[in-house]
Image: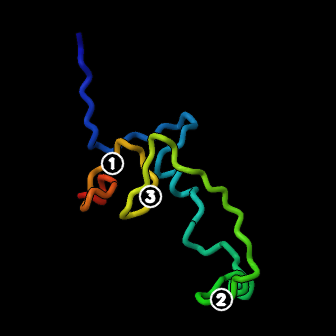
Amino acid sequence: MNAMVTDYDSPRKIDDSGQEGFTDTLTRRPDLSSGGIDVDETELAESLELPGADLSGEELAVRVIPPRADEFTCSHCFLVMHRSQRASGPGGQQVCLECAA
């Protein structure tokens, strides 16, 4: 049995079988740093909400899903976690493993 030894550090031969190499792919790739996205600065400034803005006329439509029987709310970070993530915190509070660490 003849084993063929391959030197992976040696330069590769160019294959003219129609398949392109990695360097060919890189040269064809579009330049993402060219800033091709055209942004209208005045439109962008009008869509931003500033801190302290009056939002009294705005309504939020959020569907609240109550915790399931196998979930709890961490008393430190207030995230809803699975019961397998529960640890005992100070004063017997239910905290997640990340907050208990």
Q: Residue at x 51, y 55 (%)?
A: 26
Q: Are marks 3 and 2 in contact (CB under 8 Å)?
A: no
- Kind of element beneath mark 3: loop
Quadrant the C terminus occupies: bottom left
Q: Amino acid at mark 2?
A: Ala
Relative to 84, residue 58 above or below: below
In this picture, residue 78 sits left or right of residue 54: left
Q: Position of residue 69 (x, y in %)?
A: 48, 41
Query: Residue 53's mark?
Result: 2
Relative to 58, residue 62 above or below: above
Of labels 3 and 1, earlier in sequence is 3
Measured Cα–Cα span from mark 1 to mark 2: 39 Å
Front: mark 1 or 2: 1
- Kind of element beneath mark 1: strand
Looking at the picture, tell me which residue is in the foreground, 100 or 12: 100
Around disc 2, counting alpha carbons within 10 Å, would you say few (fewer than 14), some (14 to 19), or many (20 or more)? few
- Kind of element beneath mark 2: loop
Q: Are marks 1 and 2 in contact (CB under 8 Å)?
A: no
Q: Amino acid at mark 3?
A: Leu
Q: Position of residue 79 (x, y in %)?
A: 44, 58
Of labels 1 and 2, earlier in sequence is 2
Query: Residue 79's mark?
Result: 3
Measured Cα–Cα span from mark 3 to mark 2: 28 Å
Relative to 31, residue 49 above or below: below
User: Quadrant of residue 100 in the image?
Assistant: bottom left
Of labels 3 and 2, earlier in sequence is 2
Q: Which residue is situated farthest in the top direction here?
A: 1
Around disc 1, counting alpha carbons within 10 Å, would you say few (fewer than 14), some (14 to 19), or many (20 or more)? many
Q: Which residue position is annotated with label 1?
A: 86
